[in-house]
């Protein structure tokens, strides 16, 4: 049988894939284990999917690892997740470096424990000259936090006379977001059978293709990623236009650039 990865059209890869890595807790509870057991195994999926994206030549991968709202979970789970974060960065940095991966973090990192912040900053610094996959970790991130932050920064710039309110358009606004240097995700994946966005990239996902799977994050592997990309490639992205307009444009482009 043809391997799934061969069914992917390498000329039409999404530049940016965003993933809500959900279902760790339920995966563990189903096995009669503590929720942290699920988070622990979720790290294996992170490793596998980061590697899979790097192999394919995906340019940006954003992983929603911890939301602003997740701070309200039981203290023991939050502490366990923070410890896991520090351990994982420490362990994974050499492999990330070997795979030419550059690390970025989006979110309210001032809320993270100092140890985690230091570990992240060291890793970002160490990987900063890499030119392959951009791995963007959303940590203590929520879209409403990001949008409010952007509005505050814009208001300050207007107040100081550095920004004319009439000049604010999409391009200007996007510069105030934590994702200023990244293109919008073409594909957003959520695992574990939940059909919601949970405060993730609300602005950036405006025209993303959404893919939902029942697989819980700790079971999600490269083949699941390939399935999502294949489904994405079978969809028609219209951006408000008609199907005919999109089709005519493809034909026009293919004849003008032989
Ligand atoms: C996702 O898995 C990881 C984090 C939110 C940190 P969950 O912990 O949300 O697992 P479920 O959804 O409760 O199963
Ligand atoms: C979203 O998952 C956040 C992350 C995966 C980090 P949640 O499990 O926190 O979302 P809800 O509560 O089901 O909406
Ligand atoms: Mg969840």
Image (tube, grey):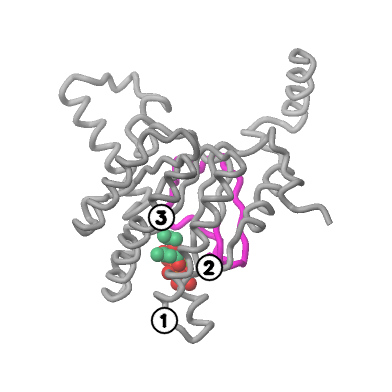
The reply, left or right, for residue 144 in relation to residue 254 is left
| Quadrant of the frame with the C terminus | top right
Which residue appears at 43% of the width and 70% of the height? Answer: 40
Q: Can you say which quadrant of the picture contains the N terminus?
A: bottom right
Q: Look at the picture and state if 221 lies above or below 255.
A: below
- Give percent across and percent down for residue 218: 53, 68
- Magenta stretch containing residue 254, yes or no? no
Give residue 34's mark: 1
Give the label, 3 or 1, closer to the camera. 3
In the rendered view, does 140 fall on the left or right side of 255?
left
Residue 92 marker: 3
At 38% across and 50% down in the image, what residue appears?
A: 93
- Front position in the image: 226 or 23: 226
Q: Name the residue under label 2.
A: 218
Q: Which is nearer the N-term, disc 3 or disc 1?
A: 1
Q: How far apart are marks 2 and 3 (CA)?
A: 17 Å
Label 3, label 1: how many angstroms apart (C-alpha)? Answer: 24 Å
Alpha carbons under labels 1 and 2: distance apart:
14 Å
Please provide the residue range marked out in magenta: 190-218
Up the image or down, 12 lies above or below 172; here it is: below
Q: Which of 3 and 218 is in front in this view?
A: 3
- Secondary element at image label 3: helix
Q: Which of marks 2 and 3 is in front?
A: 3
Toward the bottom, the furthest residue is 32
Reply above or below: 258 against 131.
above
Label 2: element kind: helix
């Amino acid at each position: 049988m043809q391997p799934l990865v061969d069914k992917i059209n390498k000329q039409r890869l999404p530049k940016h894939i965003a993933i809500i890595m959900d279902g760790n807790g339920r995966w563990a509870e189903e096995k009669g284990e503590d929720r942290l057991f699920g988070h622990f195994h979720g790290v294996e999926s992170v490793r596998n999917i980061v590697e899979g994206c790097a192999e394919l030549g995906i340019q940006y991968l954003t992983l929603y690892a911890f939301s602003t709202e997740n701070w309200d979970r039981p203290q023991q789970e939050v502490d366990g997740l923070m410890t896991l974060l520090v351990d994982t960065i420490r362990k994974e940095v050499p492999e990330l470096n070997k795979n030419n991966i550059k690390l970025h973090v989006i979110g309210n990192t001032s809320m993270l424990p100092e140890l985690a912040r230091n570990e992240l900053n060291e890793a970002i610094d160490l990987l900063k000259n890499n030119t392959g996959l951009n791995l963007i970790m959303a940590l203590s991130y929520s879209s409403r936090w990001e949008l409010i932050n952007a509005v505050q920064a814009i208001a300050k710039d207007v107040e100081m006379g550095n920004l004319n309110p009439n000049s604010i358009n999409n391009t200007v606004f996007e510069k105030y977001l934590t994702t200023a240097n990244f293109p919008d995700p073409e594909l957003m994946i959520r695992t574990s059978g939940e059909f919601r966005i949970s405060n993730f990239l609300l602005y950036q996902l405006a025209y993303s293709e959404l893919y939902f799977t029942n697989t819980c994050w700790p079971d999600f592997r490269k083949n699941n990623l390939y399935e999502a990309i294949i489904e994405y490639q079978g969809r028609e992205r219209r951006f408000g236009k008609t199907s005919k307009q999109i089709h005519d444009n493809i034909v026009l482009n293919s004849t003008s650039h032989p």
